Image (cartoon, grey):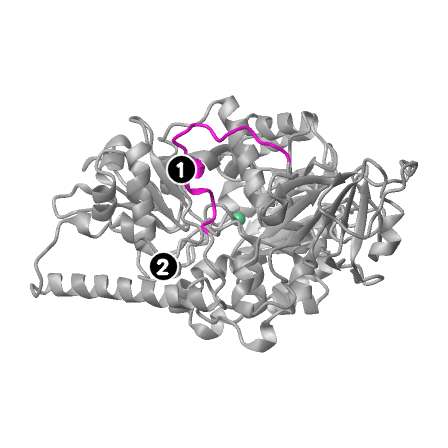
Amino acid sequence: MTTMPVSGITPVPDHNAPDSADLVVRNAKIFTGDPGRPAASAVAVRDGRITALGDDRDIAQHVGTRTRVVDALGRRAVPGLNDSHLHVIRGGLNYVLELRWDGVPTLRQALAMLREQAGRTPKGQWIRVVGGWTADQFTERRLPTPAELTAAAPDTPVFVLHLYQSAILNRAAVRAAGMTRDTPDPRGGQIVRDRNGDPNGVLLAAPSALILYSTLAAAPALDEAGRRVSTRHFLRELNRFGLTSAVDAAGGFQNFPDNYATVIDLARTGELSLRIAYHLFPQTAGQELADLERWIETVRPDEGDEWLRLNGAGENLTWAAADFENFAEPRPELAAGYEGEFEQAVRLLTENGWGFRIHATYDETIRRDLAVFEKLAADGLFPAGNRWFFDHAETATPHSLDRIAALGGGISVQNRMSFQGSVFAERYGAEAAARTPPIKEMLARGIHVAAGTDATRVSSYNPWVALHWLVTGRTVGDLTLYPPDRLLTRERALALYTHAGARLTGEENVKGILKEGYLGDLTVLSHDYLSVPEEDIPHIESVLTVVGGRIVYAAAEYEGLDEALPPIAPAWSPVAHFGGYQATPLPSSTGARQADLLAEAVAASEQHRQWRVARGFAPETPPSAVFDPCFVL
Ligand SMILES: [Zn+2]
């Protein structure tokens, strides 16, 4: 028996019987998600599947000499989480190159990280902060300025992506991207100019985010060995929060098969620590149908296994049908007549037994898409047993939801409003924001709804931030968006984050709940999700994440029990020094409250200083005084 210090279980020497487990987790408060047996205290996993659930005594008989037994020390355990809309493949290919501001509580700390990182970033490389944060999360409630980025990193190009709205570049990045006063604005984007007509370092999605991504694409990429290490560490970072599955939404600059080679190879060598169901997204406008035709000839939905499987096409099928969700800008008007090509794409997929997911933020887009689906349904072509669902659907109206329900579609919702809720409320009003997205109305119609984040470029990938939003209706800036009757119970929210995701990929009979015969995917939590104060939910992490009986993440008392990973490379990687999501103490603990108050006081005094400087009441101090790495909270 490979042991953790465990009392109460003695392996019988000859008990290396065929039914002895590979892994037993005992002394846990297990929430199974299975209405037939909602609670248990121990679980046994063998050959990747759950063989028994019950109390510690029931499970003792599954312990053999080779069984690894973990004492959960009375902690809460839940089914492994499943983010139903995560750009996990693209995120993995770039993770070690990025400085993540996810969870960083102050702009002051964010800039100090940047300055420190500039000191170790070699010439030719960039510092990239690519989403997962918003100005609202900072005590200072504002974005950094290009001048602050230049002060923190005078020579290293810095690219900071803020949601799908804007990017802020330092002077070195403007130079490295080759932007001059003669560079024209790309379609749907704006290069902000200073009074001399030179780019000032701010790029705006107006409303297309393409300007932001194409600028980022100028930065160097990793080679294949680097992409493998990067992906493995990103998956481990997701395991850190209890994620065991994700449904990849593909995305811009994620071409099939080239950009899937890394995860396909990791699946082949058994090195994935997260199950991925993926989608295929045509990359080039004008070639979408040709791409779909080629894929239909070469691969099949459901091809793969429980670790990596193809789930269909999307989240874009044709570029012209994509609405950009920049709530800081007016809703984009999609081209007249996009339906012709879109109908051909959907027809092609359904005729060939392919399901799909389709990105649609606004009801105006959803209505036009639905008209196409209804036309195909009248021909008997739709949905023809294929799994299909809308992504986002923030402003879907009750009437559109009725139509989605009638066609048997699902909806994948994300906590983009956690990050963009205040901007949305400013543009459309608090009343409209309170209905965005209309999750309760979706559920009331029996529509299948799964939850996720849309990480890594808008939201953070931290699922507990998303669960907190579902349960409290609050943004990361603590704005309350929804009245109490529009909130979900913690159990319901968790079901959207577990079993509902499995249903989107046709795997509802193998994962998403803890039950005999199901996959051994579970997480033991640092704090009890079902009983902690609401404000603590975003601070939950996993202390033990198990996928198919393998311990893929272990912390606290279990440190060192998880599988070894190769060291993070390159050595200057921001992730090697800062990690990913920046954890902060539980708000309910008194010490943390004190620290918060102090951070606010510091930020306030800095704002006050700047206010005084602007009015000539105080002398301008050199920027170095603003970045005080010794006083980072
Ligand atoms: Zn999308």
Above or below for 305 versus 24? above
Percent across and percent down for residue 135 are 36, 57
Percent across and percent down for residue 293 are 64, 30
Percent across and percent down for residue 539 are 52, 58
Mark 2 or mark 1: whose residue is earlier in sequence: 2
**Which is more toward the observer, 68 or 553?**
68
Above or below for 42 versus 249? below
Give yes or no for residue 570 being in the magenta stretch: yes
Give yes or no for residue 523 being in the magenta stretch: no
Specify few, some or many for label 1: CA neighbours under 10 Å numbering under 14, 14-19, or 20 or more: many
Q: In this view, does 413 lie to the left or right of 211?
A: right
Residue corresponding to mark 1: 574
Label 2 is placed on what type of residue? Answer: Phe
Above or below for 302 versus 450? above
Q: In this view, does 63 lie to the left or right of 271?
A: right
**Which is more toward the observer, 576 or 144?**
576
Specify few, some or many for label 2: CA neighbours under 10 Å numbering under 14, 14-19, or 20 or more: many
